[in-house]
Amino acid sequence: MEKNKEGTEKAGKYSAMARMTSRAEFSVLAGLILLIVCMSFASPFFLSVQNIFNVLSQISRYGIISVGMALIIITGGIDLSVGYAVGLCATSAAYLTTNVGLPWYLVLILILGLGAVIGLSNGLLVTRVGLPAFIVTLAVGKIITGCTMLLTSGRPIAFDSPLSVLGSGYIGPVPMCVILMFAVIVIGTIFAQYTQPGRAIYAIGNNARAAALSGIKVKKMTCIVYVIQSMLCAFCGIVVAGNLYSADATLGTGYDIDTIAAVVIGGVSMTGGEGTIWGALIGAAIMGILKNAFVLLSVSSYWQSIVIGLVILFAVTIDRVRVNRRK
């Protein structure tokens, strides 16, 4: 009896280990560790405290909005307006602070509200009108770009506010933006994995029709996810503007592709219903280290886009192979 019990316990441990190692996030984490080891040998400056915090600061902006992007992709959607939303919210915060003179707390409320309006617009057009998310968010992004240009007239706006501490402040040696990123990741992980709405998001991504038949309000939850994403973009816009002490119309350019890349590299399936928030953070870390590597190794920035593009293709290919094997 004791031998059978021990055998059962060992089998349970092996099966748990097998489930863990079969997850996409495990292989991505192994890739991140390998990349860190390689870079530690390639450059003596890579593991310095200053460089580590520099990398974390760089990925913080992608890490924050990757939480919302992961939730959207898990539902089977996409959002191409994130970079434009970051730019509009950042310039709006600078405009309301410098040109209008509003107090910081009112600016914070208004900017988060602006993000909610952008997300609600995306969500309603996708869920109520039935337009493809790809087209909706691309079109809304272009509209936002025009609004940003009208607001700034193509010129940068200074951002001198107590809110700047969110992007440029420190708690001891740790940048405030890094602390905020980890806080958002933890909250996002708890929401996605341990709450009823979070489990509903996964159900929608797996099978929206079956989710609706089981009582989940698919349209409402999908809309909420887009609102969460755009509010995170608004928050990120304030953080980035605070880091630079200014904002202009080009702020946020390329954030959409980089965020999608981080999420996909982190194991979130483009077909929906699979992936984790912390996996997206690992993907963002890989992106940040790759970009840092080009600087430390004095490699031409032209190669950066090529390598990141190849990494995205590799991640999507692996995801497609994994999905096909389950069919």
Image (cartoon, rainbow, N blue to C red):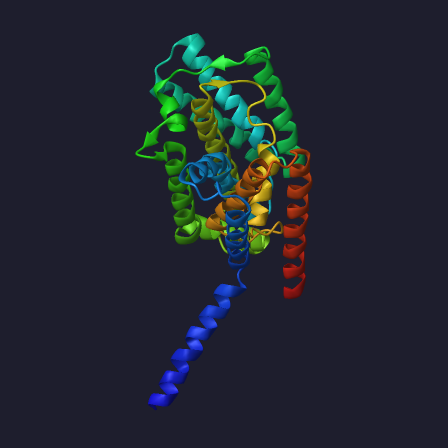
Spot occupied by residue 154 in the image (x, y as percentages of width and height) = 60, 13
Residue at 55% in and 24% down: 251
The answer to whether residue 303 is seen in the rendering is yes
> Residue at 34% of width from left, 15% of height from top?
103
Nearer to the camera, 327 or 288? 288
In the picture, the quarter occupied by the C terminus is bottom right
In the current view of this chain or complex, which residue is farthest to the left? 172
Which residue is outermost to the front?
A: 44
Q: Quadrant of the N terminus?
A: bottom left
Relative to the observer, which residue lies in front, 141 or 222? 141
When asked about the image quadrant of residue 124, the answer is: top right
* On screen, residue 16 above or below 78: below
Q: Position of residue 132 (x, y in %)?
A: 66, 38
Labels in figure, total? 0
| Along the line of sight, the residue nearer the viewer: 283 or 326 | 283
Say if 210 sits above or below 105 in the image. below
Q: x, y percentage for residue 158?
A: 46, 13
**Compared to 130, does 313 lie above or below?**
below
Kindly identify the residue that appears in the image at 42 percent across and 75 percent down: 12
Residue 274 can be seen, yes or no: no
Image location (x, y in percent) of residue 106:
36, 19
